[in-house]
Image (cartoon, grey):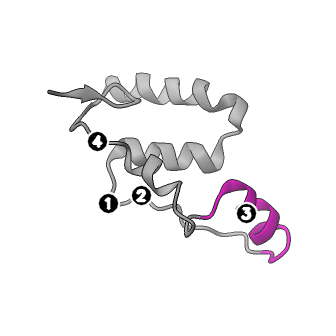
Amino acid sequence: MGCNDSFGQKCCNRQSVFENILGLETVIKKEELYNIYYNQLHIYNFKIEGRNNNINDVINNYLYYMVKPEYYEIIKQIFKERIQTI
């Protein structure tokens, strides 16, 4: 029995890796990134994980850290449409 992930791609009845890791205390949340690392510690360069992940998890990582919440669904839809044309 198959399913579709949030980008309409086939997945293997598993929760997104991205959704799973957001719950870990070792993951830097957006608020921590900007309020602590960027503003207080003046760290400006970050590596966003994703090289070995499923393409959909990589896109979710980028959207989470680089897109304002009010634009998240719009940009996600654009990515979904572009991926389907590949």
Which residue range is magenta in the image?
28-42
The span from disc 1 to disc 4 (Cα, nearest Å) is: 17 Å
Specify the quadrant that holds the N terminus.
top left
Query: What residue is disc 4 on?
Result: 14
Query: What residue is disc 3 on?
Result: 32
Query: What residue is disc 1 on?
Result: 52
Camera-side mark, 3 or 1: 3
Q: Residue at x 43, y 26 (%)?
A: 80
Q: Secondary structure at mark 1?
A: loop
Q: Residue furthest bottom?
A: 41
The span from disc 3 to disc 1 (Cα, nearest Å) is: 24 Å
The span from disc 4 to disc 3 (Cα, nearest Å) is: 28 Å
Is 71 a magenta residue?
no
x, y percentage for residue 70?
Answer: 72, 30
Choose top left, top right, bottom left or bottom right for residue 34. bottom right
Alpha-carbon neighbours of circle 4 within 10 Å: few (<14), some, or many (≥20)? few
Asked whether disc 3 touches disc 1, contact meaning CB atoms under 8 Å apart, the reply is: no
Query: What residue is disc 2 on?
Result: 50
Q: Identify residue type, mark 4.
A: Arg
Camera-side mark, 4 or 2: 4
Q: Identify residue type, mark 3.
A: Glu
Asked whether disc 2 touches disc 1, contact meaning CB atoms under 8 Å apart, the reply is: yes
Our reading of the magenta stretch's main secondary structure is helix
Camera-side mark, 4 or 3: 4
Q: Residue at x 61, y 67 (%)?
A: 46
